[in-house]
Amino acid sequence: MSDVTIEKSGRIAIVRFDRGSRANPLSLQVMRDLTDAARSFEADVETSAIVLTGGENFSMGFDLRDEEAIAKRAAPLAEKRFSVATGRRMCQAWADLQPLTISAINGWCVGGGAALAVATDLRVMANGAHFYVPEIERGMNMSWGSVPRITNLVGSAKAKRIVVLAEKLDALRALDWGIADEVVADPMAKAMEMAERAASMPPVALRMCKQQVDAYANALAHTASHMDFDQFALSQTGGDFEEAVSAFFEKRDPKFTGA
């Protein structure tokens, strides 16, 4: 049974992904299911808005314990390269959708969860929610095509504070910086309100105008990030990656050497 569900009502759809654990991490299978969920709307000309939401936490990011992902590290280069691009394909599938997409974010939105959230058009965060990109602290680069998207939202200086310095943003700071569009007690209710507004608009004009904005905002995004999944694979071969993951599981500060 999939951890990803789709519910439709009129011109609005709700996509939920919930693995039943507090962290709600993104395994390779969940990422494939989320990709399939996004692509299921490709021939849907009726839906005007899609709300994406996770569990208790939107997602604490990529599942470092995912047995399939661990096994792929020893796979042949071509297979490994395809595997590490799974998150990028997921995010691109969501970014390519013609309906307006809105993430309703509870709890923590971390790493891969953050990459997924910025691939949607809008983000509504709960009062106590947080946005955090810890990839560099785990000995990795931030990938999945997310760096240009984050930079579009907050500008280059703040993007460096989020991606390079791994600063945690509470909901109000995320709103101030431009990551969040709304901060409310009930993000799902607000996301549905925004979806209903989108659903009241002329559906074809909505899609055309959204595509115009995206075409301008992302004109150079692929040029900037087309190698990020190869960089991600390269970073996993280094000693700093192994040290970062070990330190994370052992709950200690890592000691990086540039290895």
Image (cartoon, rainbow, N blue to C red):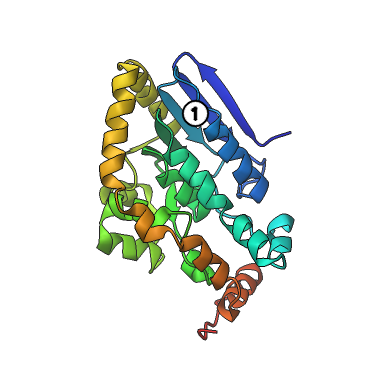
Tell me where residue 257 appears, x and y as whole percent. Answer: 52, 86
Circle 1 SS class: loop
**Nearer to me, 53 or 190:** 53
Tell me where residue 133 appears, x and y as whole percent. Answer: 45, 59
189 relative to 203 in the view: left or right: right
Residue 128 in view of the camera: no
**Nearer to me, 51 or 96:** 96
Q: Quadrant of the C terminus?
A: bottom right
Q: Quadrant of the N terminus?
A: top right
190 relative to 92 in the view: left or right: left
220 relative to 17 in the view: left or right: left
Residue 37 in view of the camera: yes
Q: Which residue does the image show at 33% across and 48% down from the upper left?
A: 179
Q: Residues within 10 Å of mark 1 (few under 14, many from 20)?
A: few
User: How many marks can you see?
Assistant: 1
Q: Amino acid at mark 1?
A: Glu
**Nearer to me, 250 or 116:** 116
Q: Which residue does the image show at 29% across and 60% down from the upper left?
A: 158
Extreme residue toward the front, this view: 78
The image shows residue 49, relative to residue 221, as above or below, that is above
The image shows residue 56, relative to residue 71, as above or below, that is above
Q: Find residue 206 and report its image quarter.
A: top left
Tell me where residue 171 appears, x and y as whole percent. Answer: 37, 47
Q: Which residue does the image show at 27% across and 38% down from the upper left?
A: 213
Q: Find residue 65 and report its image quarter.
A: bottom right
Residue hosting label 1 = 42
Tell me where residue 85 appears, x and y as whole percent. Answer: 56, 55
